[in-house]
Image: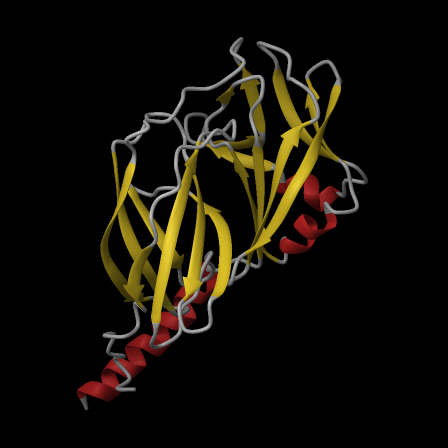
Amino acid sequence: MKKTILLLLLTFGIKTASAECSMSGMTFYPEQKEISLNSMFIIQGYSFSQKTINSFKERTIYLESENGELIKLNLQEILKSQMSLTQAIFKPSKELKPNTTYFLKYSDQTESEGREMTQYNREKKEREKVYWKTTNKKTIENLNSNLNVEFEKTEVILYGCGPSANAIFDVKNKSESEIWYKTEVVEIETNKKNIYYIKEWNGKLNVGHGMCSGAFTFNRKGKYKVRFTPMNIDGKSVRTTDWKTFESPFINYKSPFGN
């Protein structure tokens, strides 16, 4: 009887939470608005918006200043996650101008893409166009050379649309400025490698996926290894960490369905 009730609750949970997994969405980095004159940029697409990211191979992406000056962004690479995310990494074709506000612009930009190029401003409590404002500095703050990443635990949490599964790492001696982590995960049995850029969340690096999307996925059993290359938003990195080995988060997970 208890198992039947739990199954019903989980079924209703799936129906309720499924609406929280949207069909598309874009994320833009840096998240901080003040940038140097040589910042890099990452544009990430979720689900159906991955099509836009893949189209950047054939399109030109710009930064447009308030007075209409265009600076081309050179595509460095496109990385596809293992679960519904794709990101494009860019460098400006030339140094940005100081004390200037820039907005994103795509060649052959569609109306729907224009609507996606917005972010929510918590202070204004409204959505606004994605923008960055340069300082008069050529480079941003360097990272702490003693930055260290330590394994904490693996974790699986069941949500409405499915589980989140992560290997969680604690970041020590980090800088105050935004940090990107080039993350390489290898499935040890097959030696298959996947690479994606991730960011901290509450001081932790979550290597895995949420209920709707994520950079990395795991088999039910098996061992994995990961290493991180921390970098600032100018692309300047500190040394890559040693490989850190962990078991699949699912290995000790007991499903409430009993399988």
Residue 75 in percent (x, y) is at 68, 39
Identify the residue at image location x=47%, y=62%: 19
Residue 173 in percent (x, y) is at 25, 31
Which quadrant would residue 174 be assigned to in this image? top left
- Dividing the image into 4 quarters, which one contains the N terminus? bottom left
Of residues 231 and 15, the one nearer the viewer is: 231
Q: Is residue 174 left or right of residue 118?
A: left
Residue 165 in percent (x, y) is at 34, 64
Residue 80 in percent (x, y) is at 58, 56
| Furthest residue in direction left, as rendered | 2
| Furthest residue in direction bottom, as rendered | 1
Of residues 242 and 216, the one nearer the viewer is: 242
Of residues 144 and 175, the one nearer the viewer is: 144
Identify the residue at image location x=29%, y=63%: 246
Q: Is residue 13 left or right of residue 86?
A: left
Identify the residue at image location x=61%, y=17%: 101
- Dividing the image into 4 quarters, which one contains the C terminus? bottom left
Identify the residue at image location x=64%, y=26%: 103
